[in-house]
Each structure stands twice: as C-alpha cells, then as structure tokens.
Amino acid sequence: MNGMVPTAIGSGIGSEFRSPMAIAVIGGVIISTALTLLVVPVIFTSVEKLSFGRRKRPVLVAAEPARVVNG
C-alpha cells in the first residue's frame, strides 16, 4: 500500500491515468484487511455459537476404536 501513495497523490505526466488505479488498489487493500481481521472472525464466531446452541448433549469422542463384544 505504501508504494501506491505517491502514485495516488502524484501530479506528474500521466498521473491522471495512474491515480485512480492507485486509489482503487489502496482501497482494496484496506477493505480486504478489514474483512480478514474483523468481519470473517465475527461471522465465524456467531455461526459457531448458533451451532452449539442447537446441540443438547455433548459429543463424546473415543480415543481408541470401539470393541465389539460377541456374546
């Protein structure tokens, strides 16, 4: 993102073509960072809480396979 700031605020030859692209790249980096660090974990946590709310009894996981007893 730091590499795009001079391009976004530049006023040299051809800057009118490069400036919108640099602004779009900066916005995309900021939005994708916010989504990755804030929005996705919040959605994941809320969905996880909803799925645990429906479960009435705990799930038991065996450390070794169950043995079948013929009797």
Image (cartoon, rainbow, N blue to C red):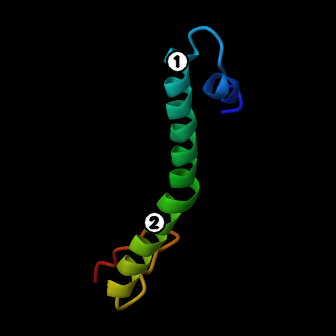
**What is the secondary structure assignment of the residue under circle 2?**
helix
- Amino acid found under the numbered disc labelled 2: Phe
In-image side of 71 versus 20 (left or right) = left
Q: Position of residue 44 (x, y in %)?
A: 45, 65
Percent from the top left, x then y, of residue 11? 65, 19
Badge 2 crowding class, 10 Å Cα cut-off, few under 14, some 14 to 19, many 20 or more, is few
Residue density around tag 1, few if under 14, some if 14–19, many if 20 or more, within 10 Å? some
Which tag, 2 or 1, sits closer to the chain's start? 1
Percent coordinates x, y for residue 62 in the rendering: 47, 74
Residue 70: give its label: none
Task: Choose between 10 and 29: the one closer to the eye.
Answer: 10
29 and 54: which is toward the camera: 29
- Quadrant of the snapshot with the N terminus: top right
> Is 60 displayed left or right of 51 in the figure?
right
Q: Which residue is mark 1?
A: 16
In front: 27, or 69?
A: 27
User: Label 2 vs label 1: CA separation?
Assistant: 41 Å
**Residue type, numbered disc 1:** Glu
Badge 2 is on which residue?
A: 44
Work out whether 4 lies above or below 64: above
- The image quadrant that residue 15 belongs to is top right
Q: Is residue 64 left or right of residue 51?
A: right
Dot in front, 2 or 1: 1
Task: State the image coordinates of residue 17 (x, y, percent, origin top left).
Answer: 50, 16
